[in-house]
């Protein structure tokens, strides 16, 4: 009996590769159900059973397709099949540890980081447990002894039919829950944009030039006769839920807490996205980060009108210092040199001369107390005394992983056991080193009268929304980060509550405080201006791609991958845990959808280089 697409006859014999892939996927499903790990979005009912069945069927057809394709490639086909199983296993372990599927976009957006083995290992160690580094290689070693290809008989199942079924399942509107299917489906979605089709059509209403970035920004403050020195400190991974928080009797941020009564603190402040490069562009250029990719790296020639350029036109000397070792990471140095900074320095070999070894424990960069000493030492040589200074500083040691901190610097948990313990110790150390900045600042001429802004480059969840990974989800702690403005004798201390602001509002706020009005292609406004109807935009580029729109205490979320919508009343539900999208009025829903359409349009504006006239 013969069928089209079969060679020699009908055979239902499965290749060892397929059987192993099915076994691995089945074990993964069992592990997910046992630990009740999120990622499917459904309770264990007929819907989830159907999803798992479709995932196993895709694993079957994809496994048979690959096994038959590489069957005759004896020299390298076996290695390819082994690598495919390795990807499946790694993706499965990632899902279990992070509680979300591995998004290939993470690799695409951060390919530059792969050139640094130390940083790669540091990130991996923050994702996987120590046991995983032994268990995964052991599993892969065992698999290397298996014959993974198709059987050796003459009647071998042709790859045509399983290949056709695999393609059909990928192009149909199915949700594939197996690791291989998700990776393929997500990759296709990234390159075709199919998941965003519902809003792409609506975004066409915003034609060329109709979404203008130019704003005529006024100031509610009088211009100072003598412009102050300005210091903007962007703290790595600053979670605001640890401000004024104590673990037992030990405060996590005691020094930062002491500054709150000396400045204006914005309680509902958000990073516009979840990575350093995106946060720096939003903060310093008042532009929403790109939906896909990093503006600094993917669009290095884009014409912006960033804060250092604007301040330079007002007579400021401008400087950017980062505690990270590599100024070329994310194309940071060249980008900021192009956009208005006169001095751009990382803690490279020249800056590290004479640094004690105990300050070099982090693979990412220099311990901040020594970093601040180096910054002020370098500024002493390069200051133009006749000009006010704008200096942006980016810390680094409170970086994802939060490990490696010397025991002598552990201020909150003496023997950390959890990721949260590591984070509290790391943030507490950064807080203590922040005190060194002010000690050095008060020792320079005009330092006590300087305007200081402290914020985060982005937030970092610590379990508040069920995740510890910033690339997963759209919870409040994924985006929230502090904003504190201190200007002695000039700015009355206080708190701004219940009104959301984001990183794009920092540049307009600074110009407002200086009493300088102007027209700039910025997306923000001063935090001292109250506009309850204004919409604020946040982007989660990974794990399904989520677009968040804030309006007052209302929070709307669009999940692009599954075309899902969420709505939260943050007045009654501060952490955004109860989706009440059904209670949103049709008119409000239309306005929020239009806001998401603007975010899609923004990506095209970036590509077309239309931000600055």
Image: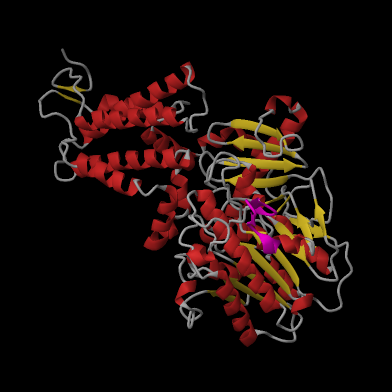
Question: Residue lying farthest top?
Answer: 1
Segment tinted magenta in the rendering: 242-256
Question: Could you say which quadrant of the image residue 599 lies in?
Answer: top right
Which scheme is used to colour this image of the protein?
A: secondary structure
Residue occupying the point 71% across, 35% down: 573
Quadrant position of the C terminus in the picture: bottom right
Residue at the spot 15% in from the left edge and 12% down from the top edge: 1
Residue 59: x and y in percent read 33, 29
| Horizontal and vertical percent position of residue 572 | 75, 34
The image shows residue 244 at horizontal and vertical percentages of: 70, 54
Decide if residue 439 is in sight here.
yes
> Between 440 and 473, which is closer to the camera in this rendering?
440
Q: Above or below — where is 201 with respect to 529?
A: above
Residue closest to the eye, 204 or 606: 606
Labels in figure, total: 0
In the figure, 356 relative to 544: above or below?
below
User: Is residue 522 among what the camera can see?
Assistant: no
Magenta highlight on residue 469: no
Above or below, 325 against 158 in this view is: below
Q: Which sits in the foreground, 261 or 269? A: 261
Along the horizontal axis of the image, is 493 left or right of 595? right
Q: Does residue 607 appear left or right of residue 285 in this picture?
A: left
* Whole-percent x, y for residue 261 in the image: 79, 61
Magenta stretch: residue 248 in it?
Answer: yes
Locate residue 543 relative to residue 308 in the image: left or right: left
């Amino acid at each position: 009996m013969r069928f089209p697409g079969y060679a020699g006859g009908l055979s239902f014999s499965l290749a060892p590769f397929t059987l192993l892939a099915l076994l691995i996927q089945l074990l993964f499903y069992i592990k997910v159900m046992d630990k009740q790990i999120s990622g499917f979005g459904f309770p264990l009912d007929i819907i989830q059973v159907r999803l798992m069945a479709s995932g196993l069927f895709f694993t079957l057809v994809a496994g048979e397709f690959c096994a038959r394709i590489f069957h005759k490639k004896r020299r390298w086909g076996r290695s390819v099949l082994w690598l495919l199983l390795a990807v499946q296993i790694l993706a499965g372990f990632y899902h279990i540890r992070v509680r979300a599927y591995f998004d290939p976009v993470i690799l695409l957006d951060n390919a530059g980081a792969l050139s640094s083995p130390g940083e790669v290992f540091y990130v991996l160690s923050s994702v996987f447990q120590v046991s995983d580094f032994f268990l995964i290689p052991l599993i892969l070693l065992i698999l290397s002894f298996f014959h993974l290809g198709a059987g050796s008989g003459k009647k071998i199942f042709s790859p045509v039919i399983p290949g056709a079924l695999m393609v059909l399942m990928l192009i149909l509107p199915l949700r594939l829950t197996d690791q291989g299917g998700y990776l393929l489906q997500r990759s296709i979605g990234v390159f075709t944009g199919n998941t965003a089709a519902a809003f792409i059509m609506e975004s066409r209403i915003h034609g060329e030039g109709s979404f203008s970035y130019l704003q005529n920004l006024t100031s509610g403050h009088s211009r100072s006769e003598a412009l102050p020195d300005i210091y903007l400190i962007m703290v790595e991974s600053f979670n605001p839920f640890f401000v004024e928080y104590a673990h037992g009797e030990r405060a996590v941020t005691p020094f930062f807490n002491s500054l709150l009564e000396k400045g204006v603190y914005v309680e509902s402040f958000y990073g516009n996205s979840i990575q350093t490069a995106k946060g720096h562009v939003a903060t310093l250029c008042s532009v929403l980060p790109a939906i896909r990719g990093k503006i600094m790296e993917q669009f290095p020639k884009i014409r912006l009108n960033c804060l250092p350029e604007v301040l330079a036109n007002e007579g400021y000397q401008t400087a950017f210092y980062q505690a990270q070792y590599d100024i070329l990471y994310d194309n940071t140095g060249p980008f900021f040199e192009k956009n208005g900074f006169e001095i751009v320095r990382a803690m490279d070999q020249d800056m590290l001369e004479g640094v004690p070894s105990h300050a070099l424990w982090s693979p990412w960069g220099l311990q901040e107390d020594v970093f601040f000493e180096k910054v002020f030492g370098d500024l002493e040589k390069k200051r133009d005394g006749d000009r006010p200074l704008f200096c942006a500083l980016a810390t680094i040691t409170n970086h994802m992983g939060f490990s490696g901190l010397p025991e002598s610097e552990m201020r909150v948990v003496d023997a950390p056991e959890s990721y949260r313990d590591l984070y509290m110790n790391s943030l507490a150390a950064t807080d203590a080193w922040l005190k060194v900045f002010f000690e050095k600042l008060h020792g320079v001429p005009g330092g006590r009268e300087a305007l200081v802004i402290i914020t985060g480059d982005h937030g970092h969840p610590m379990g508040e929304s069920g995740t510890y990974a910033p690339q997963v989800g759209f919870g409040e702690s994924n985006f929230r980060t502090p904003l504190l403005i201190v200007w002695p004798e000039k700015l009355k201390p206080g708190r701004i509550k219940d009104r959301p602001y984001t990183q794009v509002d920092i540049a307009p706020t600074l110009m407002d405080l200086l009493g300088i009005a102007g027209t700039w292609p910025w997306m923000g406004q001063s935090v001292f201006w109250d506009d309850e109807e204004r919409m604020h935009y946040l982007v989660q580029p990974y794990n399904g791609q989520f677009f968040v729109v804030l309006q007052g205490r209302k929070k709307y979320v669009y999940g692009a991958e599954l075309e899902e919508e969420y709505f939260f009343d943050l007045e009654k539900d501060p952490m955004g845990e109860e989706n009440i999208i059904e209670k949103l009025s049709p008119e409000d829903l239309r306005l929020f959808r239009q806001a998401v359409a603007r975010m899609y349009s923004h990506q095209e504006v970036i590509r077309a280089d239309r931000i600055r006239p």
